[in-house]
Amino acid sequence: PSRLTFGLPRALNLYENAPFWITFLRDCGFGVVLSDSSSTPLFEAGVGSVMSDNVCFPAKLVHGHILNLIGKGVERIFFPQVVYEHQSDDRAGNSYNCPVVTGYPDVIKSALDPADRNGVPVDSPAVSFRDEGLLKRQLAAFVRPLGVGSRQAARAVDHALEMAREKKRLLRDRATEVLARAERDDRLVIVLAGRPYHADPLI
């Protein structure tokens, strides 16, 4: 039996980092529930609470995912404020997240207020993937009041990082296969660059 069940919205940076967060939370003894895949009805369910018309569509979509999780009966929603992402290339100047992505948990708390309206708190610890030592301290501080010791939290972070690396390895292997097949068949290859959550089928 889990200590409690967290809901994770299948949106923004959680779309890419789900393998990390699911592994970390489960290793700490929590249950994890994902929101449903994005759909037009899911989007429309939350669009009435969007506070700015000019915010990007992926951010607007978050509202529907949060309502979807509340409907699933989760005890808490986990939506961290990730300031720095993983540095995917040593030559990159930084790995600073889009401010909308970083700050959207606060928007959700203000617009939907799940804690007061539905009794479902939104946990949004500030974390950085740029420094693993700092990441361990930040997450240990988050789970300590929930009954998880520092050693268990550190082991959970190590395992979660391993799972995130494995996911990226699988994606790279798949991309290599696609490129090799295209070269073999003399087919044109188009590289579509964007944020990982742009791969959400609805987006």
Image: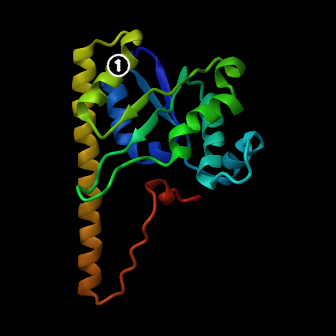
Residue at (60% x, 32% y) in the render: 106
Q: Is residue 14 left or right of residue 188?
A: right
Q: Amino acid at mark 1?
A: Gly
Q: Quadrant of the C terminus?
A: bottom right
Which quadrant would the N terminus be assigned to in this image? top left
The image shows residue 56, relative to residue 68, as above or below, that is below
Which residue is drawn at the image coordinates 23% and 48% (left, top)?
166
Q: Secondary structure at mark 1?
A: loop
Q: Is residue 2 above or below residue 136?
A: above
Foreground pick, 200 / 158:
158
Q: Is residue 115 left or right of residue 27?
A: right
Q: Quadrant of residue 174?
A: bottom left
Residue occupying the far bottom of the picture: 186
> Which residue in the protein does label 1 denote?
29
Q: Residue furthest right?
A: 48
Q: Position of residue 116 (x, y in %)?
A: 69, 18
User: Where residue 143 appears, x then y in whole percent?
Assistant: 38, 17
Q: Residue at x 25, y 18 (%)?
A: 152
**Quadrant of the image occupied by residue 159:** top left
Residue 197 image offset from top left, x and y in percent = 48, 54
Say if 26 sits above or below 15 in the image. Answer: above
Check the image and report above or below for 199 versus 32: below
- Circle 1: is it few (<14), some (14-19), or many (20+) Cα within 10 Å? some
Q: Position of residue 80 (x, y in %)?
A: 47, 32
